[in-house]
Image (cartoon, rainbow, N blue to C red):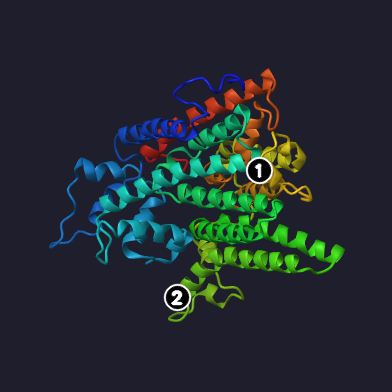
Amino acid sequence: MPSAKQVDRPSLLNPSRPLWSLTVAFVLWKTLIFLVVTACPGPGYDTSTSLLPYLNSSPTRPAVDAGVGSTLPLKFVRWDPIYFVHIVQHGYVYEQEWAFGYGFTRIWRFFASFLNPSAEVGNIAQVAWVGVGLAHLAHYLSALALYKLSANVFGRETPTQRLVCFLSAVLHIIAPAGAFLSAPYPEPIFSFLNIFGLYLYSSSFLDDGAGRKLPRDAKLLGAAIFFAVATTVRSNGILSGFLFAYDAICQLRRVILHGLSRDVVVRLSVLVLGGCVVALGMVLPQWVAYTTYCTTCSRQWCQWTLPSIYGWVQDQYWNVGFLRYWTVSNIPLFLLAAPMLILLCYASLWALRMPWAAVKERPTTVLDRAMSPEATDSLLIRLAVPQGLLAVMAFTSYHVQIINRISSGYPLWYWYLVCLVVNRAGESPSTAKSNRLFSMVLQAMVIYGLIQAVLYGSFLPPA
């Protein structure tokens, strides 16, 4: 692990040139993953993907030719993307398809429509190419957004601070999500939307400390919009709404202690509005489904007090529910998910024990002066709760193995690993034991990513 004095020397990956270095790291890793996936022979044990080119064929419209341009992108259409490409082309035809993010397929369809603006969006290969390209673009932007977010939290004035920001973004590039961040899955888009929303939120946090109230409120609402769209992509995006609930409670506490003031009323109004915007990310897709199904037929979920096709489909078609995944046959999947679950919990506890003052110990700059000395809780504490809730929900209620990919959109665990070897505020590296642990985790992530790419390209579990 390089020390603070070494990070400025010229190299291919130089934290002092973050845009160039992160781009190089991204291209090298994604190229390797792409080659591994596309080199996998045969369809694997499931032939579903090989049938896709024939779904739209007819006597007057033959199936597409199985050339390289058609077969390569289909290597990435495994598991859930088989549903995704159908939804992108034809919309939500079957009830069980509503288990998948409405926003994700709408974004994908929007970009795919540029290739073929007809009612049916292109052929399978075109749709798949767009999905793969969109995944790569979103993952790249997500890495850059994480660097900017890290700079807001830790600063980037000294070599050590730049190293913290750089290593956090590099870890995001080689995250355990692996091939799922290259394939047409919602995780890359969710990661970008959630992390960029956190960047806006952290910027508003800094603006508040500097007394810049209008930019603060504008960035808060901007963050709410990104969280809302992230929620339409993956339902766990709703956890980011905790930030607004937490801040609203803090404002109510100020009212109790100090009484009403114009600033508190404005801030509280913005927070409530932002929270409602985030909630819309969950409500609007359900409203679309309700008007689609419940006005023409009477499905059981239509009679619920809070009708939710998502909850119904997850329960009836995918067997998602509290402790339902706790079966003997799923023990290997719990073992596979255990390292990430443990890491997420440790990182959350680490942040909850972290005094905000420790993060502020860096050279005085305009950015530092924007940090409010009156803040009673740290940004890290705010971020710890959604991540901890995600780990608990994955352990008790999800198909647990997906934690390895949906964790990619949460920055706290990256920071925890980096801070094992680089002091969050000082200039000296951590202990040799922490260095070895970080190196082991990094090697494990690389090895797991490559093995996972082989399994994914061969259509083999786990997914």
Cα separation, mark 1 vs mark 2, equals: 54 Å
Q: Secondary structure at mark 1?
A: helix
Find residue 415 and report its horizontal and vertical position in percent.
63, 36
In the rendered view, would you say 185 is above or below 30? below
> Mark 1: which amino acid?
Val
Q: Which mark is residue 169?
A: none
Picture coordinates of residue 238, whole percent (x, y):
59, 58
Depth check: give the residue in front, 270 or 50. Answer: 270
Asked whether the viewer can see residue 436, the reply is: yes
Q: Is residue 291 above or below residue 394?
A: below
Q: Position of residue 148 (x, y in %)?
A: 55, 42
Residue 77 visible from this viewpoint: no
Which residue is found at the position 38% from the left and 41% from the top? 459
Q: Residue under circle 2?
A: 293
Which of marks 2 and 1 precedes in the sequence? 2
Q: Quadrant of residue 23?
A: top left
Total tally of numbered discs in the picture: 2
Image quarter in which the N terminus is found: top right
Q: Decide if residue 444 is on the left or right side of residue 451.
A: right
Task: From the image, tell me which residue sits under label 1.
Answer: 366
Q: Nearer the viewer, mark 1 or mark 2?
A: 1
Q: For the point 27% across and 51% down, which residue is it? A: 126
Q: Amino acid at mark 2?
A: Tyr
Q: Is residue 129 left or right of residue 94?
A: left
Contact check, label 1 and label 2, Cβ < 8 Å = no
- Counting from the top left corner in percent of width and height, residue 362 is at 70, 34
Which residue is more in the foreground, 143 or 358?
358
In the displayed orientation, state which residue is furthest to the bottom: 295
Tag 1: Cα neighbours inside 10 Å, few (<14), some, or many (≥20)?
Answer: few
Give the SS element for disc 2. helix
